[in-house]
Structure formats: C-alpha cells, structure tokens
Image: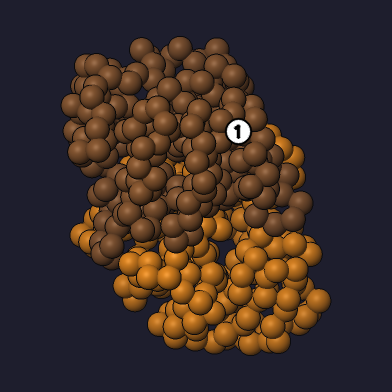
Chain colours: A orange, B brown
C-alpha cells in the first residue's frame, strides 16, 4: 500500500483448513502422511479448484468466492510464523539437516518464515522463501516477524497448536478458517466451536457454493 | 505475481455497485450530483464500512466478507479503463481543462487510466495516477491498457454503458457486482437481471451479512 496507509500491521490467519468437528490435522503425522490419518485432499479441494491456488501451474481454475480467499494469500503479507510441525514431522534435536520442509525448491511463502522450535538450526533459503528457526514465545516471535515484514502484515500459518498459543496470548487480529464438509474425529483440534471466540472477535459465517464454509473473524 | 505465473492477464469488473433493479447511476448527472438523482451513499455504504475502502483515512473498519472485495481493488491491477461519464459530467468538446476528475489530488487508481472519449485531450498525472484520453473501440482500448498494465490485470471501471459495451464485445473475463438493498428506478442500467449473462458466465450469488449481495461472474 502507499506511504501513509492508515491500516495497522496485523497478524492474520488465512485459508486455515478445518473439518466440521474442528480438526486441522489427524493423528500420526509422518513424512508420508503430513496430516496423519486425515486426507488433506478432503480439506483442501475447495482451494485447489481456484485460479489463485498457489500451487496451480495451469491457466484454469474457478474465480468465484473461494478464489478471493486463495488470491488473498500473498496480498500485503511480509512474513509468516509457523510451528515446527508445519515445517516437518520430526521431534527433538534435528537428526537430518537435509530435511528442508515439505515444499521442495519453491515453497509457496516467498517471504521470511519464522519456524518456532526449541531446537534452532541455521536458516535455509529456497527460492524467494527464507526459513528462520527461533526458540521464542509468541510475543517475541511476532516482534521479529513484524520487523521482517517491513510494514506488511504477518501470516500465522499454523498448525493448530501454534494458532491456539497465539490466540491465548491475544495476538491474533484476523482469522479466515475454511471448514470443509468432512469429519476427522481425532488429531489436532483448533476449537470445539468457533463460537468460543465470539467474545473477542466479530464473526461472519459465509457458506460457499463449493460446499466449504468460510469463517471470518476479526478482533472486536 | 512471480515470473512464470500461469494465470493469464484478464479484464476485471470490481466492486461495481448496483441497485436491486439493476441501475448503477440515476438520472441527471452533474458536478454536484455525480450519480444524478440516486444517492451514492446508499450504493456504497457497504464498501465505506470496510477496513480496505480506498478512501479510508483512519485505522478502523470491518474485516469480514465485504473487506475481501475492497481489499482486492488494487490486487494485481495494472491499469483501468473507464467511460468519460465516470471521469466527469461534461459532454461534447472539453470547455474547461481545469476539470481533472472527481477525485482531487489523490485519485484512488494509482495506475494508468484510459478514459474513453471522442474528444481527446492531453494526459493528466495526479499523484500515482495518470489519465490518458483515447478515442478507441473496446478492443483497441483493451490492447493499450494491457500493454500499460505490464502483465498485471486491467480493471474495467464503468460506468454502466462502458461495461455493457465491453460485454457486447465479449472482452470481460470476470465481474464482481455488489447489489445494495435500494431501488433507483431510472438512469443507467447494467441489466434487468444478472441471469442474462448465465449463458456466457459462471455465476455465484453471495449474500453478505451487511445486506449487500455480491454477484461473482467469470467466463465459461
């Protein structure tokens, strides 16, 4: 935006995919199954169908409501914060520094990304994305990410535990959660019901023709 | 977007404001009443309430569904095309070249803008916006605007007659029309019903909690 933009730098959850029973991932995450027993295609098919899905390599795709959400993914975002579980399935000290995330040579973020971990390691640059590994609480992580974002907003990328920690610290300004018509049953849960947040957030519920229901929340 | 973006350069109608009976403007346009007898506040209040309304000068505003539409206004747009009636109420040869549009020193476009008129005049630069006056048919206007947009999309800004002319020439790729809960009765009409376009466009109807109904159309 221009100099003098009146809008403050905010922390945004975007295109966060959830089941109707509130799970963002299943049980038993592994390299082969990043979402554990859950099928990520069932959570993400609404997004994959759109013209602006970051992974799209052909000129097709829908340009209706759902496309507004995928096309907003990079809009005025200058950095991302993610939990270690989003970067990889490993736990404890890193045993294989050759692991550079799930995304190959062209991660879709294209900004600095701050990965929260108690086990720091050297930064990794892949194309336009640089991953920094920091051992920090939510407040300190957000401070670093806002500096790196250089006036733009910061995306809070998940997973579920990370979003919950930032909600608990009252650091989340806006949330877009896309609830797909599927149940996961067990794993990582964001909420029992989005109404849990209604005391702190405005909350709009927007059903899409695709079958997904978009929940839009922003700080009161 | 990055080099190698698979999405083609498109012509987009965005945030086009309409009454329930299909009018974008009333009768009797003048300097004092850009929308004639119609009250533009009734058409635009949904947009003015959002955080990303281009005219906003304070840090407030809603961040729900409607905000996705106002925030998309500048997203990947490299040029605009508008009819002369959107630039000013004058007809025939320009009698006062001091008239530089309705928007003052900081027009909200921030790109080259191509104003269609049979009466050309020298270009005007105001802050980040440059108005070019061209006597061209829709095909030629779009060709020039696409070059100026430098790979980004082109916005078709209206008014109603201009949108109809580009629809007639089959040059419009996507349309977002926001129908406010108000009747205008007479003036400039875009359509009797959006269903008129269903043979050529996919069409989603998305009611907003604010009371406006968003129509999203994209080429089949």
Q: Quadrant of residue B28?
A: top left
Query: Which residue lies at the image location 47% right of the left edge and 78% below the top edge?
Result: A146
Specify the farthest residue to the right. A98
Q: Quadrant of residue A6?
A: bottom left
Secondary structure of the residue carrying tag 1 is: helix
Q: Please say if A153 is above or below A217.
A: below
Query: Which residue lies at the image location 73% right of the left edge and 76% below the top edge?
Result: A125
Q: Label 1 neighbourhood size at 10 Å, few (<14), some (14-19), many (20+)?
A: some
Looking at the picture, tell me which residue is in the foreground, A208 or B206. B206
Q: Please say if A71 is above or below A133.
A: above
Mark 1 lies on residue: B141
Percent position of residue B123, x then y? 52, 48
Query: Which residue lies at the image location 45% right of the left edge and 12% below the top edge?
Result: B196
Looking at the picture, tell me which residue is in the foreground, B103 or A189. B103
Left or right of residue A126, residue B35 in this image: left
Percent position of residue A170, x then y? 31, 72
């Amino acid at each position: 935006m221009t100099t003098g933009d009146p809008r403050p730098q905010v922390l945004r959850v975007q295109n966060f995919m959830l089941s109707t029973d509130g799970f963002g991932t299943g049980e038993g995450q592994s390299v082969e199954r990043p979402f554990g027993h859950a099928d990520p295609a069932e959570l993400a098919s609404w997004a994959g169908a759109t013209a602006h899905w970051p992974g799209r390599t052909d000129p097709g795709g829908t340009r209706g409501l759902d496309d507004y959400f995928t096309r907003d993914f990079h809009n005025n975002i200058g950095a991302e914060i993610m939990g270690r579980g989003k970067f990889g399935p490993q736990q404890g000290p890193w045993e294989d520094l050759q692991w550079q995330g799930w995304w190959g040579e062209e991660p879709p973020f294209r900004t600095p990304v701050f990965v929260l971990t108690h086990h720091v390691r050297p930064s990794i640059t892949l194309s336009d994305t640089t991953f920094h590994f920091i051992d920090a609480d939510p407040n300190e992580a957000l401070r670093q990410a806002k500096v790196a974002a250089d006036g733009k907003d910061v995306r809070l990328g998940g997973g579920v535990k990370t979003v919950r920690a930032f909600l608990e610290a009252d650091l989340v300004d806006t949330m877009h959660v896309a609830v797909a018509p599927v149940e996961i049953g067990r794993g990582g849960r964001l909420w029992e019901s989005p109404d849990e947040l209604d005391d702190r957030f405005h909350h709009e519920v927007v059903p899409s023709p695709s079958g997904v229901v978009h929940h839009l929340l922003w700080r009161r």
